[in-house]
Image (cartoon, coloured by chain):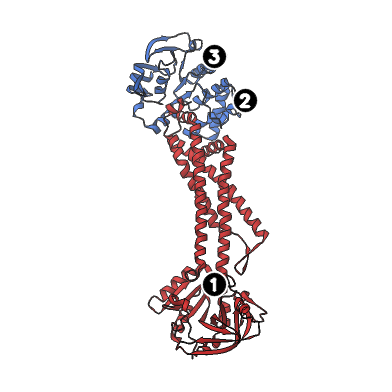
Amino acid sequence: MSLIRIDNVTKLYQTGEVPVTALKDLSVTINQKSFVSFIGPSGSGKSTLLNLMGALDKPTEGKVVINNVDIAGLDRTQSAIFRGSNIGFVFQNFNMIPVLTVFENVEYPLLMLKHISANERRDKILTLLDKVGMLDQKDKYPNQISGGQKQRVAVARALVTNPKIVLADEPTANLDHKTAYKVISIMHEMQKEFGTTFIFSTHDTKIVDEAEIIYTLEDGVIVNSEVKTNN
Amino acid sequence: MNNIIKIAVRNLFRYKRRTILTSTLIAFGVILVIVFGGLAISFKSQMIGIITNTSMGDLQIHKKGYVESIDNLPLNINLTAEELASIETKMKDIPEIAAYSPRIKFGAMISNYAQTSNIRLSAVYPEMESKTVSDLVTRIKGTMTDPVNFLKPGEILVPENLMKGLSLNVGDEVVLVATNQDGSVNGITLRIAAMIENVLGPSGKDGYMHINDAAGLLRMEQPAIVEIAVHLKSFEQLDKVYGQLKKEFSSSSLFEIHTWEQLSPFASIARIVDILIFVVKFILISIVLVSILNIMTMSVYERIGEIGTIAAIGTTPRKILSLFIVEGFAMGFLSTVAGVVLSLSTLVIMNMANINFTFGQMNLTLNPGIPVGEVFLTTFIVMLVSILASYQPAHKASKMAPVDALGHT
């Protein structure tokens, strides 16, 4: 069953006088509970595509339908609420809120969106921190933990609202191979356990093997797709 | 909302030195307003108290046209016995009026038999005058056996500079010569009961005598009153009683009523004090506006990536706006609390120190105090300006496109 449907999407950016085409008439469908990777060189359109799938941006042409919602019809507030309810994000630079502890960083999306009791919230956060192996670091601030640990916290934060989709743009770019592999493994485990669709972009060929479906992008166009059956 | 407050307060302390410097500046502004306000209000109220309680009274009633010619001390613009009785009846119906004193005011020549000078005289019923301007006796220098009846018929209180100028002493005899309403001249011999100080310094030539002596000197069958000084039970009721008397006399075009501030030159000084308090408040507003606007603008520019993150994970533009406004508000609030505590402590210390100073001939003790309303007003101003100053940067943050903010380096 399709969760994300991208139909003939073109995305142009105006940089100075010259428009730059980031995506060119691109179509792709991503099903629920899949573990998908987009690979490609820098400037191939991976981040632009993930931004569209994350309702962070809107296409110049074409249609982006996520969980049966056409994101072009959402205003800024509706987009924010939609993202909070449906999409989790893992960023290349971890993007922790520096004034909040590990626990509070994971708690933040719940406080912004969900009206659940403090006890229920606490149980949920502690469970997730335990699953990503960060329970013992819950009271530390982001500047007191390593990059790999930050990214594990980011995974927990992305999952805390039970989103249908987690988007990770180059989640391992700032990590060493061992840590990167560990983070991707955790993401894969979470995908299996919670049935969340994980979509990540990377150009790290070692970690891309973890993906079930791999799309290769070049110059804003999908030039190859590979479906693996052994995962 | 609790979460927004928590994040806002923590963000404030992210850059401790900057926050402390800005807060100190705002707190200094609050201290300036409250301490200066306390001193100025205290000085003003003491001065008004002295002016109204030692000479002028809170209100004065005259025959229509008298105040216009007050410098000439005209005797012909006076109240008839019927008019005086009518005014007294109306005043008795106003419970806020504590006392009143009818006066004759006129100019005369004073002589020690060798030298002559001019003098302005207030002829009064001593008992009524002392009830109306109860601190008048504090201006009288000499032994006062009965402060209520501070003058007896045949006595005069002579101002300090005339005493010195004419080489007079208490107990000496002086001759007063005055022109009455008809233009004829008459004289009377009086004994100096005491010396009287002028409120604002040794330049005055205002003396006091008994009203019956004045009536005799001016050849009046009945004292022709030119002024009624009125004292209220509470100074706070001035506007109310003034309005009431105005209304009472509105049907008659015979009388005019003035408050102390319409008659005393000190009212201009009081207005200048009010303007200075306003200027200090304006300085505070400027300090808060510039400080908060500056710090919040810097905060927004430093945290563009963070704004992108919170927007991406579902924070609505409205909540981002609130986050930054609460941050500016929190800074204003914390600074104001610090400023209020410090300034009230300063006022308490100043009160304990019992600072004395002289203004004109008056010895004043500095008892600075600030009305609670002024403290709340100052707090409210800072809070309001903090919100207004935070709004522009907060609005900018809330309008950022998440994708652009996330890509900001």
What colour do you see for chain B? red
**What is the C-alpha distance between the residues marked 2 and 3?**
21 Å
Viewer-nearest of discs 2 and 1: 1
Q: Secondary structure at mark 1?
A: loop
Name the amino acid type tagged 1.
Lys
Viewer-nearest of discs 2 and 3: 3
Q: Nearer the viewer, residue B184 or B49?
A: B184
Q: Residue at x 57, y 56 (%)?
A: B36
Viewer-nearest of discs 3 and 1: 1
Residue that mark 1 sits on: B233
Residue B240 in the image: above or below residue A212: below
Q: Nearer the viewer, residue B124 or B12?
A: B124
Residue A114 in the image: above or below residue B228: above
Q: Position of residue A221 (x, y in %)?
A: 36, 14
Residue that mark 2 sits on: A136
Q: Position of residue B35 (x, y in %)?
A: 58, 55
**Marker disc for residue A181:** 3
What colour do you see for chain A? blue
Point out the tag, 2 or 3, that comes first from the N-terminus: 2
